[in-house]
Image (tube, coloured by chain):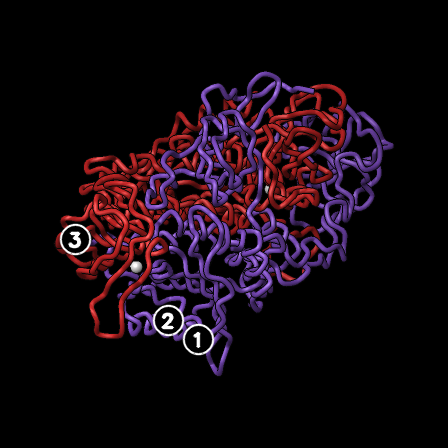
Chain colours: A purple, B red
Amino acid sequence: MLSIAEANEIVQGSISTLDSIDVDLFAATGYVLAEDITAKEPLPPFPASIKDGYAVRSADGAGEYDVDFEQLAGSAPGSLNEGKVAYITTGAPLPDGADAVVQVENTEDLTGPSGSQQRVKIVKAAKGPGDDVRAVGSDIQAGEVVLPEGSVIGAAEVGLLATVGAAKLRVYRKPVVGVLSTGDELVEPGEQHLGPGQIRDANRLMLASAASTSGCEVIDLGIARDTVEDTEAKLQLAESKGVDVLLTSGGVSMGNKDFIKGILERKGKVHFGRVRMKPGKPLTFATIDASGSRKAMTVFGLPGNPVSSIVTYNLVCLPALRKLSGHQEPGLRRVDARTQTAIKLDAERPEYHRVSLSWHRAGGGAEFAASSTGGQISSRLLSMRSANALLELPAAQGVLPAGSVVSALLIGDLGGMPVLEDLPMIMPLKN
Amino acid sequence: MLSIAEANEIVQGSISTLDSIDVDLFAATGYVLAEDITAKEPLPPFPASIKDGYAVRSADGAGEYDVDFEQLAGSAPGSLNEGKVAYITTGAPLPDGADAVVQVENTEDLTGPSGSQQRVKIVKAAKGPGDDVRAVGSDIQAGEVVLPEGSVIGAAEVGLLATVGAAKLRVYRKPVVGVLSTGDELVEPGEQHLGPGQIRDANRLMLASAASTSGCEVIDLGIARDTVEDTEAKLQLAESKGVDVLLTSGGVSMGNKDFIKGILERKGKVHFGRVRMKPGKPLTFATIDASGSRKAMTVFGLPGNPVSSIVTYNLVCLPALRKLSGHQEPGLRRVDARTQTAIKLDAERPEYHRVSLSWHRAGGGAEFAASSTGGQISSRLLSMRSANALLELPAAQGVLPAGSVVSALLIGDLGGMPVLEDLPMIMPLKN
Ligand SMILES: [Mg+2]
Ligand SMILES: [Mg+2]
């Protein structure tokens, strides 16, 4: 049976980055750039004051001066007369003739009653030419690539793009994700009365939430009942709605109502149908080629147990969505962490054990502490509550003792990890 | 002058979590729960099969049996006749009379030609009562709080909420954030021709991107020109648009066109106007009380330099937005990291040095490696490109040598951190 690493290799090798689209900078956050962005002009485009103060000829030194004029931000540079200084604000262009700025804190206003000539005493002179002036191109040079193709656009990147005038950009399209649950036992989450044998559908909304967090448009395809006809109809609905990636859950086990794999074999290519992992063994991956007006579709048949479905989503589907969206490093990130309790290993399958990582300082060092989220049976979704990582436990006999260091795959934002009580607000430096 | 820790204490003490609203579960991702969510029924609500296979009386043991009926997922439990077994699918209720399940892999189908009585050989018997059966309430007990007030709703939480039928929830409202830039030098990002003394406005879109990443609704208030009248008009516009948190940038320095602080002093309470930090000294924080139909408004006057504005946003405004949104631990998370290059310290002010963290294994240990993003002058937004953390450097003389361990505040998702080449796909266990 395939390992998760092998499964990911097959998935990543079977899909390609989607086509690119134009977006407004205001809506570009989260996309991946499909073009290099180059600065057309230098930044600053003119020698700019770093401070509020006085533009001077640095050779003139300390002393008392007439204020020639005010050089405000946003105005064209004036021309400074000999023996005078100009009042200047932060970001204003340096007047012709000036070569430095003296900040207002180093001056004294000598101006008399209202209406009289403005005069100032330079108490502490500029150190030399260029003092408190940003030279042309010192932040960004003309022709410089400020963001290469493949950059993920976050807030800082939006700022850079605004700076260089990239108000419209070419980015990779994000996949349209369809979510579909299967099973006669499922009712809608809003259903308050459960009939005999019924449970509420958790997977569809959970997977929709996960995919939308990655910025994908999500299409709710509802629940397929346990007949070949209904399951096929839902797959056709996905195609007609322009779904790029279909996430189904359930219907991939050994039961006589598990139709997904058979239908996918008839419609496209099933690359694999089982993975050696716990939880999540019956993970199915298929591709359906484009034909006529129909787009190509990537299908993941996830297990029906909610934990299996969200764990396999994170391990395999999320990297696939990232690759389709243009990410150059689509895989989950790996850190190491110390286990806080003993963990029984599975002799047959590598286990992805849900933990909550937090940063822990002890003794002379610091490390991630991994707290198990408790009972790991694949139906127990409480084991995913506030999990931000999956420990990679090998298939082996016996028990992994508390205090072991294990690699962990990040599945949550550590910006929200639990804060341990002993964490000081400001940490002294350590060498 | 205040430290960042003191500034945060003032801000966090001056604001309160916003009121709560009802949302549909489908749109609840990213919100903080404003109520405890309790399971009304146990999960599973009936003894449920974990496998596809045969429901048996475990005492009957191995042997050949008639198949009494099919117990499918979603159907009411049948009643198993003595000396027989029932075919059962994953998630189906255990029939009355049965007490265990034997998975199909441990059986042999003995059924003859189509139409004849279904018969099966149990090759490997169930270990005892309860084998491959989920007991009622084994995943969630009736009356159990599955998510307490204050929980941040991610994908797994959406799944849990769906499971217990919480299709509508009470969550804390997210702040409406207004973004406003100030300065006569600014033109829109789409402007292709820069006049003398002009630059493009980067801060407004950058802050809008940052706030929208936190799930806030963002209102673009445009650019205020350097007059008291225009600046006041923009503040009134913010109030009339129902802004909870106003983020302005620029206009908070020592120049004679820096009006923000004075206007805020007339309209509300300015709590502080400077913070001892680099970059970002002229950070202003004010609150304006509610009056009549006007909501209360929290105002952050951020510095005009783009790096100062996004760094102060992360250090002070983001924790404020999180507190308003109901987060119980609104502060940035702190880890420790080893510097890769020597860093010159600032003798006067603690510096928040932008770095890119990645996970590094070397020798017997593993740690975060912190790579500086280069020149740290506050106008150079390139120093924020792909930064995911801020090193907390103390105010001190001299140079911090390469290889020092320093605390770092997370400002980006480590799920996208750079992958070092030496990172193996599967890490062997270490003790
Ligand atoms: Mg099923
Ligand atoms: Mg200004």
Tag 3 subunit: B
Residue at 18% x, 43% y is: B41
Extreme residue toward the bottom, this view: A292
Q: Earlier in the sequence, mark 2 or mark 1?
A: 2
Tell which of B137 and B148 is nearer to you.
B137
The secondary structure type at the circle numbered 1 is: helix
Answer yes or no: is residue B286 visible.
no
**Residue under disc 2 on the same chain as residue under disc 1:** yes
User: Is the CB of mark 2 within 8 Å of ligand 1?
Assistant: no
Location of residue B112 in the rendering, given as x and y in whole percent from the top left corner: 27, 70
Q: Residues within 10 Å of mark 3 (few under 14, many from 20)?
A: few
Q: Is residue A269 visible?
A: yes
Q: How many marks?
A: 3
Q: Position of residue A304 (x, y in %)?
A: 35, 55
According to the picture, the residue beneath numbered tag 2 turns out to be: A235
- Name the residue beneath numbered marker 3: B83
Q: Residue furthest top?
A: A363
* Residues at circles 2 and 1 in contact by the CB criterion of under 8 Å: yes
Nearest to the eye among marks 2 and 1: give it: 1
Q: Amino acid at mark 2?
A: Leu
The amino acid type, in three-letter code, at marker 1 is Lys
Find the distance from the CA under tag 3 to the CA under tag 2: 42 Å
Q: Are marks 1 and 3 in contact (CB under 8 Å)?
A: no
Dot 3 and dot 2 within a common chain: no
In the image, is A361 to the left or to the right of A72?
A: left
Spot occupied by residue B173 in the image (x, y as percentages of width and height): 32, 43
Residue drawn at x 48%, y 56% as measured from the top left: A317
Q: Is mark 3 within 8 Å of ligand 1?
A: no
Per the image, the residue denoted by label 1 is A267
- The amino acid type of the residue labelled 3 equals Gly
